[in-house]
Amino acid sequence: MWKTILRRILLMIPQIIILSLLVFFVAKLMPGDPFSGKINPNTDPKTIEALKHQLGLYDPPLVQYGHWVQNIFRGDFGQSYTYNRPVLGLIGERAANTFWLGLLTAVLTYTVAIPLGLIAGKNEGKWPDRVIAFYNFVVNSVPPFAIYLIFLILFSFILKIFPSTGTVSASAHGFVQIFFSRIYHMILPAIAMMLSGTTAIVQYLRSGIIDNTKEDYVRTARAKGVPEKVIFRKHILRNAFLPIASSLGGTITGLLSGAIVAESIFSYPGMGQLFLQSVNSRDYSVMITLTLLFGILTLLGNLLSDIIMSIVDPRIRIQ
């Protein structure tokens, strides 16, 4: 298995190089520049031009790319034009918020989805299965952004149960108060994202249980007199979990990539919201770094999924 991991890591190197080229040059093709929104009738054009020359915005694209790569290897991802601070520190602060929100969402998603999938799979065609199928149908029929807006309007503005912005209340002091305040601010967006995330897991698990119940090895185990609980636990359930295990790597790395739409609607200061702000303000340093980070996390997620699958299902290991 170690050879497989090493091979996949080596294959990631050219993928990251191609990704960095695409990210950098596509960002440069966007209209405007970081100073477009700061120009007013009182702005001195010479000052803007001097800043552009100072930042190398008039250098050839390949030269700009070379400088950018050299700075990355030195740990310098540039300065944010909007916030006027190092990009790495800015993203680091937002990454912590996104991670905790993603972690809570993942815990809620699997806590709800796995029992629902088990109930639906074990009761095929019965009323519990029909109720869960109706739940899946309703949630899949509503776009995620609509669910977020409904939750925000209902629970924040009408019922006033949860806050609509921020991560921690201004009145919170001390570790305990800040900890519970952070969770309180995350509950609403986490539950809203959880609804959209459960449907696929429920369907995968339900279909896996139903399909594996009809396999020959299950019939053989029953013919040998193996107890039904043992058959379900060791044969049906284990194989039914394979599709979920294959997506687990993407879920784990997705904790840091954030939910752009959800963070924007709930005004949650995470990496998703920061990415949208950087696009709107043409903050190239932040935008390029975040896009590259999301791409690398996706590659790492695929690698982690392969590792998990090779552990739970030795048949797919590459020799």
Image (cartoon, rainbow, N blue to C red):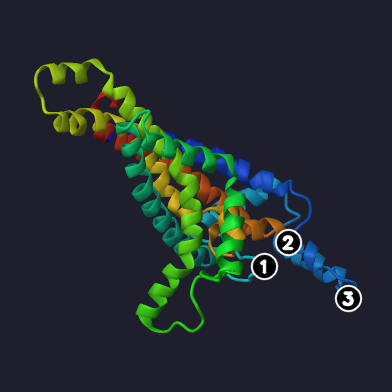
Q: CA distance from mark 2 to mark 3?
A: 18 Å
Q: Position of residue 116 (x, y in %)?
A: 36, 42
Q: Which residue is mark 1?
A: 82
First in sequence: mark 2 vs mark 3? 2
Q: Which residue is mark 3?
A: 42
First in sequence: mark 2 vs mark 1? 2
First in sequence: mark 3 vs mark 1? 3
- In the image, what residue type sits under mark 1? Thr
Badge 3 vs badge 1, beta-carbon distance below 8 Å:
no
Q: Secondary structure at mark 3?
A: loop
Q: Residue furthest left?
A: 225
**Residue shown at 42% from the left, 48% from the top:** 253
Residue 251 showing in the rendered view = yes
Q: Position of residue 202 (x, y in %)?
A: 40, 38
**Residue shown at 86% from the left, 73% from the top:** 44
Q: Secondary structure at mark 1?
A: loop
Q: Nearer the viewer, residue 208 or 166?
A: 208
Q: CA distance from mark 2 to mark 1?
A: 8 Å
Q: Secondary structure at mark 2?
A: loop
Badge 2 vs badge 1, beta-carbon distance below 8 Å:
yes
Count numbered badges in the picture. Answer: 3
Per the rendering, the mark at residue 34 is 2
